[in-house]
Image (cartoon, rainbow, N blue to C red):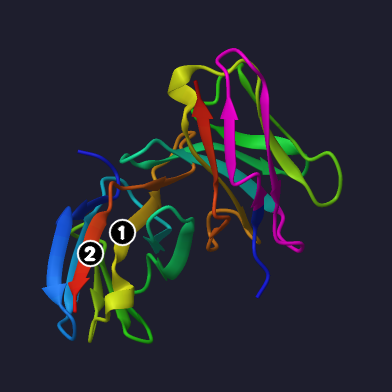
């Protein structure tokens, strides 16, 4: 069964550094998402992406964050200048028909900002 | 309270017993989804129930939806140790929140 893959599985970075988290969504899906989960807390929506543009973004997704689909397969989340509070699991997801269809999640990237 | 709020927060039962988890939400919905998360892993979609459906089954899972009470339940029958996980309901609250997850029910199946 096709799956969403995320790399790296773990990323450690220093405060103020830029990080790029990578995702390969399921190939025939049209909608892509990033969520994050701070340890022990809820899964929080960051952004949704469709037709090469952001369709929705939460208050968390401020100017420090950006997303890109640089080619036909990858979907990336960039955090420009990381803060300690950015430490979390970041999950990529994709779906065929937006939120009216199931989301397929990757196994996440654990980001640790020191 | 929050959209898509599950209860109980934690549930521990013996293998073979049934587990029931509940979800309440605030606003009108088009659909409600249930997901499972094993520790340290991504969420796995279990069932999507649409607002015009009242009940849906998938293997040992049964989901009900009561739109008049704005609530849903997930029943896992004949539980197994492998069912140990956190279970989340998810809805679209409106605004720019995407698919919103609750805090989840942490289910532990005792062998």
- Specify the subunit that label 2 lies on: B
Q: Element at badge 1? A: strand
Towards the viewer: B105 or B33: B105
- In the rendered image, residue B36, in percent from the top left (x then y), is placed at 38, 63
Towards the viewer: A47 or A101: A47
Can you identify the residue that label 2 sits on?
B107
- Provide the residue span drawn in magenta: A6-30
Residue B71 in view (yes/no) = no
User: Is residue B75 shown left or right of residue B14?
Assistant: right
Q: Residues within 10 Å of mark 2 (few under 14, many from 20)?
A: many
Q: Are marks 1 and 2 in contact (CB under 8 Å)?
A: yes
Towards the viewer: A2 or B75: A2
Q: Element at badge 2? A: strand
- In the rendered image, residue B26, in percent from the top left (x then y), is placed at 26, 45
Where B15 sits versus A28, above or below?
Answer: below
Can you identify the residue that label 1 sits on?
B86
Q: Residue at x 23, y 84 (%)?
A: B77
């Amino acid at each position: 069964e096709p799956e969403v893959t995320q790399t790296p599985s773990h990323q450690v970075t220093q405060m103020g550094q830029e990080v790029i988290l990578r995702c390969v969504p399921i190939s025939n899906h049209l909608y892509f998402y990033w969520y994050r989960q701070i340890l022990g807390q809820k899964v929080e929506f960051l952004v949704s992406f469709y037709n090469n543009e952001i369709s929705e973004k939460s208050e968390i997704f401020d100017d420090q964050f950006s997303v890109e689909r640089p080619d036909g397969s990858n979907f990336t989340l960039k955090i420009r200048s990381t803060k300690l509070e950015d430490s979390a699991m970041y999950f990529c997801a994709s779906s065929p028909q937006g939120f009216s269809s199931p989301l397929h999640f990757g196994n996440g990237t654990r980001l640790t900002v020191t | 309270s929050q959209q898509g709020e599950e209860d109980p927060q934690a549930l521990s039962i013996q293998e073979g017993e049934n587990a029931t988890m509940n979800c309440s939400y605030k606003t009108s919905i088009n659909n409600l989804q249930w997901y499972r998360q094993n520790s340290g892993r991504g969420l796995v979609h279990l069932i999507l129930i649409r607002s015009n459906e009242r009940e849906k089954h998938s293997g040992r899972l049964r989901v009900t939806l009561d739109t008049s009470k704005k609530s849903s339940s997930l029943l896992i029958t004949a539980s197994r140790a492998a069912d140990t996980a956190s279970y989340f309901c998810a809805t679209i609250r409106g605004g720019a929140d995407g698919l919103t997850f609750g805090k989840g029910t942490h289910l532990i199946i005792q062998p």
